[in-house]
Amino acid sequence: MSEKDKLVIFDTTLRDGEQSPGATMTKAEKLRIAKALEKLKVDVIEAGFAIASQGDFEAVKSIAESIKESTICSLARALDKDIDRAAEAIRPAARGRIHTFIATSPIHMKHKLQMDPDDVVAQAVKAVTRARGHVDDVEFSCEDAGRSELDFLCRIIEAAIDAGARTINIPDTVGYAIPEQFGETIRQLLNRIPNADKAIFSVHCHNDLGLAVANSLAAVNAGARQVECTINGLGERAGNASLEEVVMAVRTRQDLFKVETGIDTQHIVPASRLVSTITGFPVQPNKAIVGANAFAHESGIHQDGVLKHRETYEIMRAQDVGWHTNSLVLGKHSGRNAFRTRLQELGIQFETESELNEAFTRFKALADLKHEIFDEDLQAIASDTRQNDEDGLYELVCMQVCSETGVVPRASLTMKVENKEHKVEAEGSGPVDATFKAIESLVDSGCNLQLYSVNNITSGTDAQGEVTVRLERGGRIVNGVGADTDIIIASAKAYIEALNLISRGGTRQHPQGADV
Ligand code: KIV
Ligand code: ZN
């Protein structure tokens, strides 16, 4: 048996991650991410905020029904209605947790809650007691703990543990903490709270000063035994501590940490890719662990050193975090069996045989164009196929774009709106502009384009381009993603997907907006 303590990895990509503007995910997308997190062997998956909307409730419930290896958690404000809704959503889970929270900093109590500290303590105790009436596994968070007074934290945490909380989370909600000071806060709490040994102390750090991972690790060294984090560091504003960085720091520096995680690190890169594709948030090339350059050695001296002895410049092995050195998988002559087998190896599942057939047809068409098909291409084919099968108001049938020096670019499209075909065309400053104008001449969506980005899925000029289009209407933000070897077609697909998402509508509450 290991002498190290277990560090619980609590992933909140599906809850705090989804609070990033534009990172809204559908229920099917959340389920795919939850499956990737289960494969990673994440201990706790915060699947959502059940009371936020009917969609959120259903997503948490369907994750609770399908995921058996990780604990499934729902967030709930310290309100009866939130707690009861969270309990209902996680009921099917093999192991379920309710995570309830209330703000504890003077600034939040005075201006946001407009409650005095005694009432906040009473509300916290009531919430934890109610949650314990539903499940044994209850987590209590002191929102804005990073700016709360230590004495007050000690008082409310002691009361929450007495009421039955088994995990106490100390969030640095606004990313204000500095590692040494944050570590000291955790140390003090553990020393001063008389019943601290009855709970696991957790941290949840935001990255406003770029210190979320450093603060989390300082807390671990001070005695925290759960870290809340997200894939790719997604999350509200500047994001949360990134799961891959926390996990790999602990694993790489076992000489310094008295803990170990249960994470199967080989699934990190595929999980990162999946989250990036679904949310449309690209991973910056120099991002630690999961960035395209994280293991690339550009300078001659470095390359020479790595070839002679890998450890001269590498502290981790690329394959340990899921980078495949040989990711060329299929070609023009690969058959259906090879295709199906590789999809299974990548953890891609289709719900019906007809989806698989459609994906195979797309694969063959792509192989005709670019001959060598990589894992990343297969992931894009899978997302495209699933998108196509989700009932959307708008559909691209075919398109033609004219781009010539000295001539104004022009796009002509045939689109289906509720299954009726329409032909549209428009001019624009470039082929993408003309395409979007042509679509808008039919749809007149009233959306603002917030982001347009193109990334190549693999290298080379024959690679598929993956386009992300972020649209905003009435405060609602959605991301559409489209992939194709022709980036203008990818752009049209992405724009139409975003329009379909926005047309589905729906509103949701923000957990930290209006409180109690
Ligand atoms: O940042 C925060 O304080 C949170 C809590 C709800 C845990 O996300
Ligand atoms: Zn948060």
Image: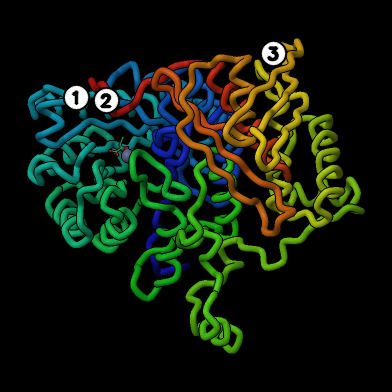
| SS at mark 2 in the image | loop
Which residue is drawn at the image coordinates 30% and 26% (left, top)?
Answer: 77
Residue at point 55%, 55% (across, down): 268
Q: Are marks 2 and 3 in contact (CB under 8 Å)?
A: no
**Badge number at residue 417:** 3
Name the image colouring. rainbow
Of callouts 2 and 3, the N-terminal one: 2
Identify the residue at image location x=55%, y=61%: 292
Whole-percent x and y of residue 474? Answer: 41, 17
Any mark on residue 78, and which?
2
Q: Earlier in the sequence, mark 1 or mark 2?
A: 2
* Viewer-proximal residue among 163 and 447: 447
Name the residue at the bottom extreme: 308
Image spot of residue 369 (x, y percent): 83, 49
* Residue placed under numbered mark 1 in the picture: 123
Residue at 28 percent across and 25 percent down: it is 513
- How crowded is the residue under tag 1: few (<14 C-alpha within 10 Å), some, or many (20+)? some
